[in-house]
Image (cartoon, rainbow, N blue to C red):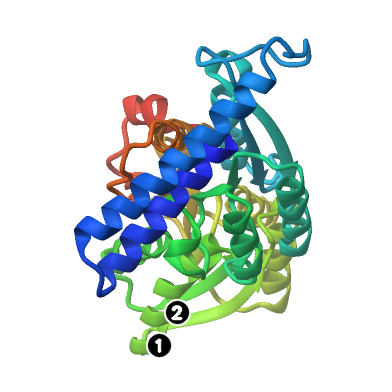
Amino acid sequence: MKKKVLAAILAAAMAMACLAGCSSSSEEASSDAAETEEAAETEEAAEDAEAAGEETAETAPAADGELIRVGIINNDPNESGYRTANDADMKAMFTEENGYDASFAYSLKNDEQITAAQKFIQDEVDFLLLSAADTSGWDSVLQDAQNAGIGVILFDRTIDASEDLYLASIVSDMEQEGQTAVDWLESQGLEEYNIIHIQGVMGSAAQQGRTGALDAKVAESDNWNLVTQQTAEWNSEKAQQIVQSVIDAGTEFNVIYAENDDMAKGAVAALDKANISHGVGKDVIIMGFDCNKWALQELLDQNWNYDGQCNPFQASYIDEVIKKVVNGEEITEKTIILEEKGFDATTITAEDVEKYGI
């Protein structure tokens, strides 16, 4: 399997180099790619012949006689309802029944994820699937994976790395999520926006995208003010403490912009404790992200005002990319952006809660 992946990566790298303006002819590049793949397949055939009859009982073979080994690096599934759904989606897809031998590693810290990635590279997985805790610091690891013939596929979150270091990126458009939310908030037509901004884990793609749009709007608008801007690291209890400190200080506010549902929930707990009304037509506008079913129910009950969708179901897209690579097919889309929307408490329906809630 590794030889097939390596051949596909080499062919993709050659194609990208040619698109960048290489001077060799397309016929010569095609000949080189064909020779590379033919050599890889010849070597694999020899290995298969040598290993004939030596299958172990540890893993059942897939339909083509060999399981695809994947190392999956994700954030802590207990981080949020979104992450729980995302992890469950990955585990449902990457099973022996579907032709995979999958190993999982979890952390909210970039350095721990990088250590896990290096371990997967040493273990010679076929593919490395990555939802990075931070957007930076991945170049050397991805280069090591490419040198080892391991295909890297990003999911959920983007990173700051050259596109030639990974096969594909299946992600949400976090910047658009933030812009959609800010546009909705602007449409509410408040005379003055005094905002408690509760951020996620700093440096993550979700935090950067959801923060960026709000920061830009505040910078350009005299009547938009940040009462406080702090990270609660996706945590409900920390979010409650942030809002409670603002209440205790006696500072006026009328919007809570929380970068995930759990933090919005914690913020609301502080409001309820202080008997401050919130939701449609009330004192404080409540905004969250991720569209947990319970959060959309809060919109339906008009206790919250807005929730931005973040689609956790990416495994089927990743499976499609892997199968294309294994079969020697061309990957026509380097980046796949998942479709998402924002929900307003005044227009959401019970059907929306059932259809989009995670």
Residue under the point 27% across and 41% down: 347
Quarter occupied by residue 227 = bottom right
Cβ atoms under marks 2 and 1 closer than 8 Å: yes
Measuring from the top left, give residue 63's x and y in whole percent: 51, 12
Judging depth in this view, the residue of 277 and 214 nearest the camera is: 214
Q: Which residue is mark 1?
A: 219
Q: Position of residue 74 (x, y in %)?
A: 65, 46
| Residue for badge 2 | 215
Q: Amino acid at mark 2?
A: Asp
Q: Amino acid at mark 1?
A: Ala
The residue at the point 46 percent across, 50 percent down is 9
- The kind of secondary structure element at disc 1 is helix
Q: Is residue 4 left or right of residue 110?
A: left
Which percent across, then down, holds residue 318? 46, 37
Looking at the image, residue 20 lies above or below residue 358: below
Q: Circle 2: is it few (<14), some (14-19), or many (20+) Cα within 10 Å? A: some
Callout 2: SS: helix
